[in-house]
Structure formats: structure tokens, C-alpha cells
């Protein structure tokens, strides 16, 4: 017997095509009950005992109310069931509001799931298990079979064929002289009404199965799309969180080393982190400095390159020397020295 279970039964699992007769026979044989209608399981007591069978000791059966008649008593049973599911990590949502209404379809689906879950998680069985003694500790557990026999007529679904036959036998015994009619049908051929009903049920089942398969396919596609979207959002969230974390580290380092830290370098590094894409590698060391990056800082107008002036040609050099000589004569002998020098030369 497993200590816990994480078993999932999908909507298209074969369990959801199990007939109500198989369901009731399963409960009656395993738990020694006399259920005749699916709605009799709406109180949650049967589900509690089956769960306690799968996980011994998971539900205190003395708290289960087998003679529950009101909604609040049903809810109490389902609370015990949900606690056991949570404890053993059974991933199954129990829609209590729908089950306690006693509707046939809602309770049938839940019973189908319970049977499938039992076959997967607890099919090994318990040889020493006494179902009657186990539920006798609960309120009304000793008379559970009598309670089910009395409440069968309170539900709208039909009795099983065996139960109808039993009632007919009882009725015929009370009227021994009542005339009986026998109908003769051809051998190997079912009555016409039964054949029509059977064909109609098969058609409805195929139609329902096709609709469920189409709905399941649509939900699977939608689920894949949501998973992809979620993955992209998480990746983007982590990407921007890393940016904020890097900037926080740089600012903390700048605050701790305000005297030696360069504000302009800090601004440039912040820009590099902000403008980095997912393909860029921006790695910070323990002091908040960027170790390796491929990020270009914000564009700044480059300074023009230095160009050395071209050397003067020979004629320009001669004129320059002459001008310098004139300036020297004027400074030494006065402004007229230059003219005197020129006249002497001539």
C-alpha cells in the first residue's frame, strides 16, 4: 500500500466510461454495502471509507456520518476526505458544492474517478480488512445498509435491473393469483424496443466521446500556448531583474567608496548595463566593476586627430629670416636702422 500518491486520471481515461452498475458493484463488494443508486454516495461517506481503505488511518472513520441528511453534514464528510487527499498529495479537486446536491452525473464522474484511483493506488487489497466493523465506529455506520435501503426511493435515477427484479418478485409474492403475461420473442434476437434504445445509447456515447476529444485537444493546444507565453515572461522578468541587480551592486560600491569612485565611470557602466541585450555579456566583479562587456557606451562626438603643421618651403624660410633680421635691427638701432642698412648695401 503506498504511503502517498500523485496519481492523475484524465478526462479521456477509460475510467470515465465505466457503467454505474460496475461502480455500484465495486462499492458493494469491496465495502459490503447495498447501494442501488449513484446518488447515495453524495454524502461523501463511501468515498471516506474507500480512501481510508487505500491509505489506512488517513481518515478517522468515527467522525464519518453515514446517516447524514443535511448539507452541512455532507460537507463535514468531504472535509475529512480533502484532508486525507492533501496529506497524501492526491491531486484531485473535490467540487463539494456540486456533489452535495445529489445530482446523478456529478456523483457518477466522481465515483468513476474514485474507482480508477483505487485500481492505480490501492489495488493490492487488505486481506484483514473488515469494512462493516470499520465503519461501525462512525455515526450511523452500524445501520448504513438499512439507511441506504430506505433512501433509495428518494433519488431520481433508475434502480439497477437486479433491484427492479427483486421488487417485482416481492410484488408477485404478495399477489400469488395475479395473472401473468408471457411474450415470445424470436430466438437470438432482442426485443425491438431494447434494440432501438441500445442503438441510441451507442450513438449518444460516440457523440459525447467525440465532443470530449475535440474539447480535450483544444485545451491541450491552449495549455501549450500558455506554457510558451509563461516561459517567455519569466525569461524577460529574470533578464530585467539581473539588470537592476547589477546597477544596485554598482551604486552600493560607489556609495562605499565615494572618495575614490569616479562618478563618470559609474554613469558609463550604468548605461552599458541598461543598453545590454540578452546576447551581450556583462559581468561584474566583486567591487561592482565590469569585467568583460561588448556594449558600446552612448555615442560621443570624437575629437579630431592631431595633425602636425607642414614645414615651410625654402623661399618662405628666406623671407622669414629677413623679416626677423629687420625686426632685430629696428629693436637695436631704432626704426631707421633698417633703411640705413638698405642704403649702405645699395
Image (cartoon, grey):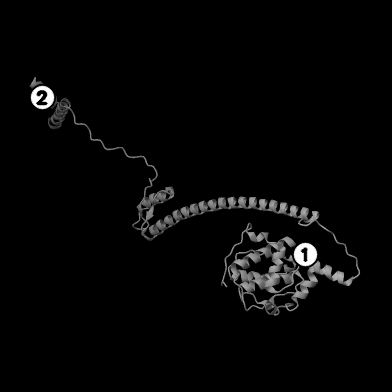
Q: Which residue in the protein does label 1 denote?
A: 161
Q: Nearer the viewer, residue 222 or 287?
A: 222
Q: Which residue is drawn at 34% across and 40% down?
A: 302
- x then y, percent, for residue 219: 61, 52
The Cα–Cα distance between marks 1 and 2, rounded to whole angstroms, is 149 Å
Q: Is mark 1 on a helix, strand or loop?
A: helix
Q: Which residue is drawn at 54% across and 51% down?
A: 229
Q: Nearer the viewer, residue 214 or 270?
A: 214
Side (left or right) of 122 relative to 318: right
Residue 133 visible? The answer is yes
User: Mark 1 against mark 2, which lies toward the viewer?
Assistant: 1
Mark 2 residue crowding within 10 angstroms, few (<14) / some (14–19) / many (20+): few
Q: Which residue in the protein does label 2 denote?
A: 341
Q: Is mark 2 on a helix, strand or loop?
A: helix
- x then y, percent, for residue 102: 75, 65
- x then y, percent, for residue 138: 70, 78
Contact flag, marks 1 and 2 (Cβ < 8 Å): no
Amino acid at each position: 500500500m503506498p504511503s502517498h500518491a500523485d496519481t492523475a486520471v484524465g478526462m479521456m481515461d477509460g475510467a470515465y466510461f465505466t457503467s454505474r452498475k460496475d461502480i455500484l458493484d465495486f462499492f458493494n463488494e469491496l465495502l459490503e454495502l447495498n447501494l442501488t443508486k449513484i446518488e447515495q454516495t453524495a454524502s461523501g461517506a463511501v468515498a471516506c471509507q474507500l480512501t481510508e481503505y487505500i491509505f489506512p488511518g488517513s481518515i478517522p472513520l468515527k467522525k464519518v456520518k453515514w446517516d447524514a441528511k443535511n448539507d452541512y453534514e455532507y460537507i463535514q464528510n468531504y472535509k475529512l476526505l480533502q484532508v486525507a487527499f492533501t496529506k497524501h498529495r492526491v491531486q484531485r479537486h473535490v467540487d463539494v458544492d456540486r456533489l452535495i446536491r445529489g445530482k446523478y452525473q456529478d456523483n457518477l464522474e466522481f465515483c468513476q474517478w474514485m474507482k480508477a484511483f483505487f485500481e492505480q493506488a490501492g489495488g493490492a487489497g487488505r486481506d484483514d480488512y473488515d469494512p462493516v466493523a470499520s465503519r461501525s465506529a462512525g455515526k450511523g455506520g452500524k445501520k448504513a445498509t438499512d439507511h441506504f435501503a430506505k433512501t433509495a426511493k428518494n433519488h431520481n435515477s433508475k434502480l439497477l435491473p437486479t433491484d427492479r427484479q427483486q421488487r417485482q418478485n416481492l410484488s408477485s409474492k404478495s399477489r400469488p393469483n395475479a395473472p401473468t403475461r408471457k411474450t415470445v420473442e424470436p430466438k437470438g434476437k432482442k426485443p425491438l424496443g431494447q434494440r432501438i434504445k441500445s442503438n441510441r445509447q451507442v450513438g449518444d456515447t460516440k457523440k459525447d466521446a467525440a465532443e470530449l476529444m475535440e474539447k480535450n485537444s483544444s485545451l491541450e493546444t491552449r495549455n501549450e500556448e500558455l506554457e510558451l507565453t509563461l516561459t517567455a515572461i519569466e525569461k524577460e522578468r529574470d533578464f530585467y531583474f539581473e539588470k537592476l541587480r547589477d546597477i544596485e551592486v554598482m551604486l552600493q560600491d560607489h556609495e562605499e567608496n565615494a572618495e575614490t569612485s569616479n562618478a563618470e565611470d559609474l554613469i558609463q557602466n550604468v548605461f552599458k548595463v541598461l543598453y545590454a541585450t540578452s546576447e551581450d555579456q556583462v559581468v561584474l566583479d566583486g567591487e561592482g566593476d565590469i569585467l568583460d562587456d561588448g556594449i558600446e557606451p552612448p555615442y560621443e562626438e570624437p575629437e579630431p586627430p592631431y595633425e602636425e603643421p607642414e614645414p615651410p618651403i625654402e623661399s618662405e624660410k628666406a623671407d622669414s629670416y629677413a623679416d626677423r633680421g629687420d625686426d632685430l635691427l629696428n629693436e637695436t638701432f631704432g626704426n631707421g636702422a633698417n633703411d640705413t642698412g638698405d642704403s649702405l648695401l645699395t
